[in-house]
Image (spheres, coloured by chain):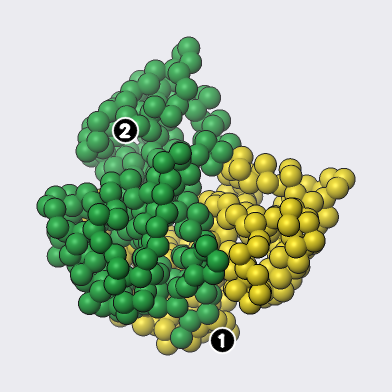
Chain colours: A yellow, B green
Amino acid sequence: MSGWVKVAGLGPGDEAMVTDQVRAALREATDVVGYIPSVARVAARPGLTLHPSDNRVEIDRANHALDLAAAGRRVVVVSSGDPGVFAMASALFEALEARPDPGSFDIEILPGITAMLAAAARLGAPLGHDFCAINLSDNLKPWELIERRLKLAAEGGFAMAFYNPRAASRPGRFERVLEILRDSLPGHVLISFARAVTTGEERLLTVPLSEATPEMADMRTMVIVGNADTRRVGRWVYSPRRAG
Amino acid sequence: MSGWVKVAGLGPGDEAMVTDQVRAALREATDVVGYIPSVARVAARPGLTLHPSDNRVEIDRANHALDLAAAGRRVVVVSSGDPGVFAMASALFEALEARPDPGSFDIEILPGITAMLAAAARLGAPLGHDFCAINLSDNLKPWELIERRLKLAAEGGFAMAFYNPRAASRPGRFERVLEILRDSLPGHVLISFARAVTTGEERLLTVPLSEATPEMADMRTMVIVGNADTRRVGRWVYSPRRAG
């Protein structure tokens, strides 16, 4: 088989944060597959077929990419951020696992700047000490597991980065997240809401946990919770390297 | 003040993984400050002064950068990986905090591809589900805190990424890490050792926890521990999106 699949991260939105490696893959591609807003970031050109698809069809999209590669096409699956963090890389391997010939595919994962690290950079350095990354969506795991992880992360003094804060299947769930955090952490702990970072619609807000409300996050917001030592200096928020 | 400081991530080693944003900052810089091997990655040119410094002098380096900026210089502080993950961004804010005039500095943090995400991409998608990033160095925190975090992360079913696995002040400590993991997790859980990823010296090794030995990691190794569902497909290792 001469075709290949590269799963590439486009970063948070700013085109200057795309790596050369990803740009090169897009130049060589015959096909680009991905969620509509990610594919919209790829410039059309002769010889390149764009295949935008809707949200929540990750496995279909992965199978489509594998089928195209099996037919000799050079396929880039685009994800915003990094494909390995709550994005298309795992879905591709799930689809691959269901194939009779997983070893026959030429696959490469091309990392990108993931949302939490782009958000952290805009805020300062809130993830400069040990931290956890948690997907708050309960589409693919029980809500109880999310609650348990929040409590353990708080108990361990980890900073936390939350993906998909408002994606839970029922309203009120992010309110419950804030409640758990307030029950588990001192009220002065800083929580940051970083919306649409590096785009024209970027909005940054940091408040003590005691003042946080659910409306501060929407689907485009990355939420970062500091640890007990996280603090402000000037307009920045950072976690010192030292702890304990 | 017309000077500035940009703290920039050079990524894991492959020059194709450096962002345009970081390249542009290096083109505009008058001074580059950083740990010797990071500064060695920046090409010399007329008008650019390189200031390589030794390891473990992060605060001196940060103060040097702030002093240069205060004198009107355009300074890039280079870190490998991402500056916000166990790197120079927090050190810069610590130094800034000790200044009488923190608000007077023009500072920007430019993210890069951090080691754990570069390693994850080379391995497959082991961090495709909730995960923790833990710095195993006990230079700046008590060893007991590291042990506690390992146990809580294991209890929560988080995948884990370890920075500085062999940096602990005493030998035998990484052996203790493996012991804690084996006590807390099923023996089939996969652990990956990703050394010098994206460089000519890259070496990838994945074994079940029950077969892991301390010598599998050195100072240039990123260690990634899967969760109980993490598995192999072909030559890849990945964590499914679904859990519980």
Residue A227: percent from the left, percent from the top? 30, 63
Q: Residue at x 54, y 69 (%)?
A: B233
Q: Give whichever of B232, B118 is nearer the camera.
A: B232
* Extreme residue toward the top, this view: B46
Residue B14: percent from the left, percent from the top? 50, 39
Using residue B141 as the reference point, say whether residue A175 is left or right of it: right
**Residue A210 appears in the picture as rendered:** no
**Residue A26 appears in the picture as rendered:** yes
Label 1 lies in what chain? A
Q: Does A115 sit above or below residue B37?
A: below
Q: Give whichever of B215, A208 is nearer the camera.
A: B215
Give the spatial CA distance, label 1 vs label 2.
Answer: 48 Å
* Extreme residue toward the right, this view: A46
Query: Which secondary structure lies at badge 2?
Result: strand
Q: Residue at x 68, y 46 (%)?
A: A25
Query: Which secondary structure lies at badge 1?
Result: loop
Dot 1 alpha-carbon crowd within 10 angstroms: few under 14, some 14 to 19, many 20 or more: few
Using residue B90 as the reference point, say whether residue B28 is left or right of it: right
Amino acid type of the residue tagged 2 in the rendering: Tyr
Amino acid type of the residue tagged 1 in the rendering: Arg
**Do the residues bearing badges 1 and 2 touch, measured as CB atoms within 8 Å?**
no
Q: Which residue is mark 2?
A: B35
Using residue A163 as the reference point, say whether residue B208 is left or right of it: left
Q: Residue at x 40, y 62 (%)?
A: B206
Q: Give whichever of B104, B172 is nearer the camera.
A: B172
Q: Does B225 sit above or below residue A168?
A: above
Residue A170 is tagged as 1
Dot 2 alpha-carbon crowd within 10 angstroms: few under 14, some 14 to 19, many 20 or more: many
Using residue A96 as the reference point, say whether residue B13 is left or right of it: left
Q: Residue at x 72, y 64 (%)?
A: A65
- Are dots 1 and 2 on a single chain? no
Q: How many marks on residues?
A: 2
